[in-house]
Image (cartoon, helix red, strand yellow):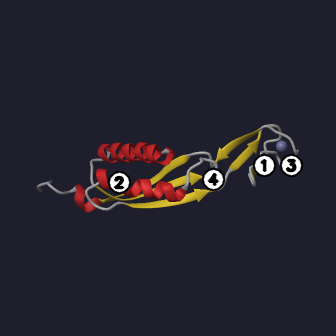
């Protein structure tokens, strides 16, 4: 259920961006999913396949990249990759740390079939 609503939000975002950009056929969407976002990539892909079919007339590809969790120590400023959900600074051994990457779903890029964008334009 979580993945479905995320995909719905994502598709709306994509439609908005493409419409603002003059339209076109969306061929592929690249998405980054953080390890900490709670998103199950397989469920996300399944929800995308189902929902994208309702939104786009042609098949649209999904490039899903799972990114590791990164954080920054708020005490000493050390940046590090979080392993095994251990949110402690490896340098000073304390915290708190701020998660800088890996806790969200991020739209990275949209590939639009540019040939479709000139359709209907008479020169
Ligand atoms: Zn530290």
Tell me whether the residue at label 3 lies in contact with that at label 1, contact meaning CB atoms closer than 8 angstroms: no
* Residue located beneath label 1 in the image: 86
> Helix or strand or loop: what does disc 4 sit on?
loop
Neighbor class of circle 3 (other Cα within 10 Å; few <14, some 14-19, many 20+) is few
**Total numbered badges shown on the rendered structure:** 4
Mark on residue 52?
2
Tell me whether the residue at label 2 lies in contact with that at label 1, contact meaning CB atoms closer than 8 angstroms: no
Residue 24 horizontal side relative to residue 45, left or right = left
Q: Earlier in the sequence, mark 3 or mark 1?
A: 1
Q: Is mark 1 within 8 Å of ligand 1?
A: no
Q: Earlier in the sequence, mark 4 or mark 3?
A: 4
Query: Which one is closest to the eye, mark 3 or mark 2?
Result: 2
Residue 61 horizontal side relative to residue 67, left or right = left
Q: In this rendering, does residue 51 appear at all?
A: yes
* Residue located beneath label 3 in the image: 91
Label 3 to label 2: alpha-carbon separation = 45 Å
Label 2 to label 1: alpha-carbon separation = 36 Å
- Which residue extends farthest front? 1
Label 3 to label 1: alpha-carbon separation = 13 Å
Q: Residue 59: percent from the left, percent from the top?
A: 31, 62
Neighbor class of circle 2 (other Cα within 10 Å; few <14, some 14-19, many 20+) is some
* Residue located beneath label 4 in the image: 35
Q: In this rendering, does residue 110 appear at all?
A: no
């Amino acid at each position: 259920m979580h993945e479905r609503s995320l995909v719905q939000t994502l598709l709306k975002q994509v439609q908005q961006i493409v419409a603002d950009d003059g339209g076109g056929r969306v061929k592929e969407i690249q998405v980054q999913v953080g390890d900490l976002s709670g998103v199950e990539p397989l469920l996300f892909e399944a929800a995308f396949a189902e929902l994208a079919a309702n939104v786009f007339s042609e098949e649209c590809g999904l490039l899903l990249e799972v990114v590791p969790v990164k954080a920054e120590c708020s005490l000493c400023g050390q940046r590090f990759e979080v392993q095994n959900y251990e949110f402690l600074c490896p340098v000073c051994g304390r915290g708190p740390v701020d998660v800088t990457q890996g806790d969200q779903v991020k739209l990275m890029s949209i590939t639009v079939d540019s040939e479709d964008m000139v359709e209907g334009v008479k020169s």
